[in-house]
Image (tube, rainbow, N blue to C red):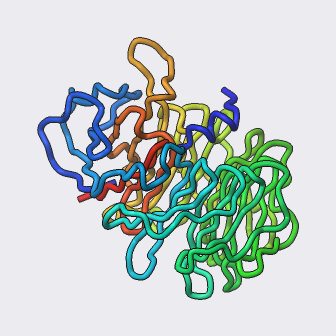
């Protein structure tokens, strides 16, 4: 099933709090402060029916601070970093701004960062010359670099894309911080963040949009994994600027890709329009396993309590028929070591735009109106 980039981007709710044992759940979809988590069975469960199950519960550390995050605008992307000793979230919104929130309180950190001329589609954080920075991508065809401590833009990738820039992923190449961007113009590009200049030729020059990108380290060398609307998943050696291999197995387009480490080896987790999540060994480009799941629009990966997990977001599928409800979202948490679902979070339209697993094991989940942080314990 071919999915347009508009539908994928619009509902890419992009990357949670204490897990507590409980014998009962609220009977309806929860407020942003609390969402039900229960063992995931085959297929999805529509929002509002989670009260029938027992298991564990996710509790948010702070309210979503809706007005403080973005007013009535969609939150399209989220990342995290440490700023002056405190963990903060960095969000990109539909109103072309970049905002920070203190993860201890949920309160804004400084004023919004402005400069983009259209929706912010991707956010990634890294360190440049010892200072935390964010790299953002936008529908305005640019990627920009922000000094988060100084609260100002420090650079712009001047080779503008011919269309939206969908995603960004940072890494380190020969000791210097770099970022890989993916765009609707069919290219993936490598940038030196200190100079904001492109390194080498395009990493990918495709006949269709490049939807997603993430980076990993393979044998001491940085690599990128890209997904295209009408092409293969490619593993690219960033030092050489050429593909190392392809990840083949999905039947149809792949909406998102995330990387992490499993048993000491770098892996990629992908979600496709063929209603599967697949896990790949990047060293061999072989599929380790796949799991059926409602078509995942977005995937994030990281460590929770020291265990690698993936988080997928998908529309609900109702039991009375094979129809999707894009307005009602399902988040699933997958234990990558155990190769199975660790839980399912159902919270209706609240989950709608972005998710990420922070380095400290929190799951940040955004919606069109705000952001919540949940912590596993």
Height in image: 139 above or below 156? Answer: above
Indicate the position of residue 239 as horizontal and vertical percent values. Answer: 76, 75
Residue 290 vs residue 41, the one in the foreground: 41
Q: Residue at x 66, y 75 (%)?
A: 221
**Front position in the image: 259 or 62:** 62
> Residue 152 vs residue 91: left or right?
right
Please name whichever residue, 290 or 352, is drawn nearer the observer in this view of the structure: 352
State the image coordinates of residue 375 (x, y, percent, origin top left).
29, 58
Q: Residue at x 76, y 71 (%)?
A: 191
Q: Looking at the image, is 171 positioned above or below residue 71?
A: below
Q: In what quadrant of the picture does the N terminus appear?
A: top right
Relative to residue 129, is residue 238 drawn left or right? right
Give whichever of 92, 81 is nearer the camera. Answer: 92
- The residue positioned 61% from the left and 49% from the top of the image is 95
Q: Residue furthest left?
A: 23
Label total for image:
0
Q: Residue at x 87, y 66 (%)?
A: 201
Residue 118 appears in the picture as rendered: yes
**Residue at the far top in the pictured view:** 320
Residue 260 at least partly seen:
no
Residue 320: x, y in percent?
Answer: 40, 12
In the picture provided, is 186 more to the left or to the right than 178?
right
Residue 293 image offset from top left, x and y in percent: 47, 34
Left or right: residue 130 compared with residue 362: right
Q: Quadrant of the C terminus?
A: bottom left
The quadrant where residue 357 appears:
bottom left
């Amino acid at each position: 099933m071919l999915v347009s980039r508009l539908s994928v981007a619009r509902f890419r709710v992009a990357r949670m709090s204490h897990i507590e044992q409980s014998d009962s759940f609220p009977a309806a979809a929860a407020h942003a402060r609390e969402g039900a988590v229960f063992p995931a069975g085959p297929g999805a469960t529509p929002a509002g029916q989670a009260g029938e199950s027992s298991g564990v519960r996710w509790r948010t550390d702070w309210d979503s601070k809706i007005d403080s995050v973005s007013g009535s605008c969609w939150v399209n992307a989220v990342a995290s970093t440490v700023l002056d000793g405190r963990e903060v979230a960095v969000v990109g919104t539909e109103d072309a701004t970049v905002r920070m929130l203190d993860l201890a309180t949920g309160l804004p950190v400084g004023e919004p960062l402005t400069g983009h001329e259209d929706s912010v589609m991707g956010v990634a954080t890294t360190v440049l010359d010892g200072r935390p920075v964010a790299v953002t991508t936008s529908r305005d065809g640019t990627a920009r670099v922000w000094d988060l401590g100084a609260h100002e833009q420090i650079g712009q990738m001047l080779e503008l894309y011919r269309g939206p820039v969908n995603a960004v992923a940072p890494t380190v190449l020969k000791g210097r911080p770099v970022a890989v961007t993916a765009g609707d113009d069919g290219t993936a590009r490598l940038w030196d963040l200190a100079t904001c200049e492109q390194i080498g030729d395009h990493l990918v020059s495709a006949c269709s949009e490049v939807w997603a990108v993430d980076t990993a380290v393979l044998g001491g060398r940085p690599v990128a994994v890209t997904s295209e609307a009408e092409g293969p998943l490619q593993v690219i050696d960033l030092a050489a600027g050429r593909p190392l291999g392809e990840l083949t197995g999905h039947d149809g387009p792949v909406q998102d890709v995330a990387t992490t480490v499993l048993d000491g080896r770098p892996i990629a987790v992908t979600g496709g329009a063929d209603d599967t999540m697949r896990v790949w060994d990047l060293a061999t480009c072989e599929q380790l396993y796949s799991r059926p799941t409602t078509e995942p629009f977005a995937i994030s990966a990281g460590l929770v309590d020291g265990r690698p997990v993936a988080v997928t977001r998908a529309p609900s599928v109702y039991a009375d028929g094979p129809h999707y409800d894009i307005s009602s979202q399902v988040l699933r948490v997958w234990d990558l070591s155990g190769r199975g679902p660790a839980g399912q979070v159902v919270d209706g339209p609240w989950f709608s735009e972005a998710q990420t697993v922070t380095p400290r094991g929190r799951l940040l989940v955004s919606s069109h109106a705000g952001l919540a942080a949940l912590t596993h314990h």
